[in-house]
């Protein structure tokens, strides 16, 4: 079995009273991820809250405690230049200034990181040029099973006030069209909306969203998780075929003591 563990939306801020709380929450999420013995940990964006250098230093400190390799894709709150600078020595970063896209290997699986951060908007962006970049990455990996990761979910989410989280919905539909051309895409991991979402799809591929790892920012039913650490376990067989997607939760200290 091959296991990928997802973290997301840690929103580490450069404000003391929230910084310490959310950094502890990230530390607990890292501990949870380590207990799950993943081959790779993916972080689906909004690592930092305002994209400041000091915020990424804290993210880096905690993520470096992971016992498995890790990758991060930018969210709408992230700064690409400062993220690149903070993680410059890791293989998934590059020296460019535009979107931060990459392909990494995890056993038989190819993990494709697609940067959905838009210009001057909190919503997702995947215009024709960006979709062609996604197509090029999937073309490179068409002989292998793929886990696709991005910050913004490219599917409608009826339970939230604004169900369409792309600046133009044709961008999201275009992502689905691209994925439909690559049946080797096993699943799509997303963040951004701070809720636990499963049962949706991007094209033919099952899609899911992890509740954010900043407990004070959780929305909808995810608020019931309180301050518990969460991670998404995505399991594949030895050939890289998807087997299971499951939310894992660490009990709060008070609950564990009962």
Image: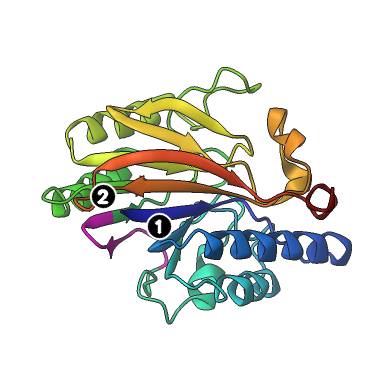
Q: Label 2, on which residue?
A: 133
- Give the mark, 1 or 2, whose residue is nearer the N terminus: 1
Side (left or right) of 184 relative to 69:
left
Looking at the picture, how far across and down is residue 242, in whole percent?
Answer: 30, 41
**Secondary element at tag 1:** loop
Q: Nearer the viewer, residue 175 or 213?
A: 213
Looking at the picture, how far across and down is residue 139, in whole percent?
Answer: 15, 48
**Is the residue marked by circle 2 packed among few (<14), some (14-19), or many (20+) residues within 10 Å?**
some
- Tell me which residue sits at (19%, 50%) in the image: 239
On residue 99, the disc is: 1
Side (left or right) of 245 relative to 238:
right
Q: CA distance from mark 1 to mark 2?
A: 10 Å
- Tell me which residue sits at (62%, 72%) in the image: 62
**Is the residue marked by circle 1 packed among few (<14), some (14-19), or many (20+) residues within 10 Å?**
some
Numbered circles on residues, count: 2
Residue 105 magenta? yes
**Image position of 204 with respect to 134: above or below:** above
Quarter of image, res 194:
top right
Q: How is the image coloured?
A: rainbow
**Image position of 118 with respect to 109: above or below:** above
Looking at the picture, how far across and down is residue 229, in whole percent?
Answer: 68, 52
> Which segment is the magenta one?
97-110
Asked if marks 1 and 2 touch (Cβ < 8 Å), the reply is yes
- Tell me which residue sits at (71%, 34%) in the image: 219
Looking at the picture, how far across and down is residue 114, in whole percent?
Answer: 37, 50
Side (left or right) of 91 relative to 20:
left
Residue 92 magenta? no
**Secondary element at tag 2:** helix
Side (left or right) of 225 relative to 177:
right
- Tell me which residue sits at (24%, 35%) in the image: 178
């Amino acid at each position: 079995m091959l296991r990928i563990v997802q973290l997301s939306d840690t929103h580490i801020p450069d404000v003391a009273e929230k910084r310490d709380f959310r950094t502890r929450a990230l530390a607990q999420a890292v501990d949870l991820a380590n207990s799950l013995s993943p081959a790779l940990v993916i972080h689906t964006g909004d690592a930092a809250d305002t994209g400041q250098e000091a915020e990424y230093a804290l993210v880096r400190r905690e993520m470096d405690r992971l016992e498995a390799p890790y990758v991060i894709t930018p969210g709408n709150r992230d700064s690409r230049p400062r993220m690149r600078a903070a993680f410059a020595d890791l293989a998934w970063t590059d020296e460019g200034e535009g979107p931060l896209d990459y392909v990494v290997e995890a056993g038989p699986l190819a993990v494709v990181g697609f940067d959905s951060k838009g210009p001057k908007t909190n919503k997702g962006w995947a215009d024709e040029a960006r979709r062609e970049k996604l197509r090029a990455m999937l073309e490179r990996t068409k002989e292998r099973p793929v886990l696709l990761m991005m910050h913004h979910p490219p599917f409608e989410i009826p339970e939230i006030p604004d169900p369409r989280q792309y600046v133009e919905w044709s961008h999201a539909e275009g992502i689905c069209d691209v994925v439909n051309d690559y049946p080797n895409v096993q699943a799509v991991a997303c963040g951004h909306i701070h809720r636990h979402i499963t049962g949706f799809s991007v094209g033919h591929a099952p899609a899911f969203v992890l509740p954010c790892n900043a407990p004070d920012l959780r929305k909808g039913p995810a608020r019931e998780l309180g301050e518990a650490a969460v991670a998404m376990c995505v399991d594949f067989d030895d050939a890289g075929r998807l087997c299971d997607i499951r939310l894992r939760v660490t009990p709060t200290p008070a609950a564990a003591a009962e």
